[in-house]
Image (cartoon, rainbow, N blue to C red):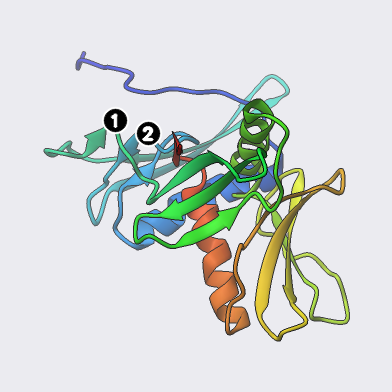
Amino acid sequence: MPDEETIYESETKRSRRGIASYLRRLANALSRAEPVPVNEEQTVTVTPPADPELEIELERTDDELTLELELAWTEGEGDVDLDAKASKATFELFEDAGGKWRWRLVHDNGNIIADSGEGYASKQKANQGLDSVRSNAPGAYVVDRSKDDDEATPEGGSDATFELFEDAGGKWRWRLVHDNGNIIADSGQGYASKQKAKQGMRSVQLNVRGAGVEQKS
């Protein structure tokens, strides 16, 4: 029998849209030949070769069905990273001039790609808001408020929705609205085009999970 080692394992119940969102992140990384995030925090990544073996298995046990998707290949150097930083952004937590706590999500290129949009009474509340964005942004629906209909595009599944809109000055922005009606994040800036606003929103969805938190004085 060959030696077998479980490097990482998790089991959780997810909605179909949530699963689709997770698989989409994996598919995007695979198509770009980038390290594939294994866990939600993106601290464990794996880098498959160009042509791994794909096995798909559908099993029935009594009244339970199991669908398994498996990639297999001969391990090479650097294929597994257990201390990865797949995110290219960092949360900055800070106290503003009015004594309110806020956060902003800063890309490694220096651009602020999201902010809290409001001040919180305490650092704890700001952290809770940040965690809500981290949890909900990757799988949130996208609604384009510039269109006559409000049909949501099925981008994933979460308790929040991205709203894409044109402001009074002709700039394009987005906001992330929780199901309870609260705006939990916004673009923090206006974009010259809808396409640029969408790119900024996608950057948030891609990087928010694994972003670290730094407190600024």
In this view, the residue in front, 30 or 61, is 30
Location of mark 2 (residue):
43
Determine whether the residue tagged by mark 1 lies in a helix, strand or loop.
loop
Kind of residue at badge 1: Asp
Numbered tag placed on residue 49 in the rendering: none
Q: Residue at x 62, y 29 (%)?
A: 123
Mark 1 or mark 2: name the one nearer the start of the chain: 2
**Where is residue 176 shown, x and y percent of the image?**
71, 55
Q: Give percent across and percent down for residue 169.
A: 72, 84
Residues at discs 1 and 2 in contact (Cβ within 8 Å): yes
Q: Looking at the picture, how far across and down is residue 70, in whole percent?
A: 40, 38
For image coordinates 35% across by 55% down, the residue present is 108
Q: Which mark is residue 83?
A: 1
* Quadrant of the image occupied by residue 14: top right
188 relative position to 29: left or right:
right
Where disc 2 sits, the SS reads loop
| Quadrant in the picture for the C terminus | top left
Residue 152 relative to residue 149: left or right:
left
Query: Residues under labels 1 and 2: Cα distance?
Result: 5 Å
Residue at the image point whose x is 32% and y is 22% from the top? 7
Please identify the residue farthest to the left as the structure is shown.
77
Image quarter of the N terminus: top left
Query: Considering depth in this image, is 6 or 129 the residue closer to the camera?
Result: 129
Q: Nearer the viewer, residue 56 or 175?
A: 175
Q: Position of residue 86 (x, y in %)?
A: 36, 45
Residue 101, compared with residue 157, is above or below; it is above
Residue 117, placed above or below residue 63 = below
How packed is label 2: few (under 14 Cα within 10 Å), some, or many (20 or more)? Answer: some
Tell me the kind of residue under disc 2: Thr
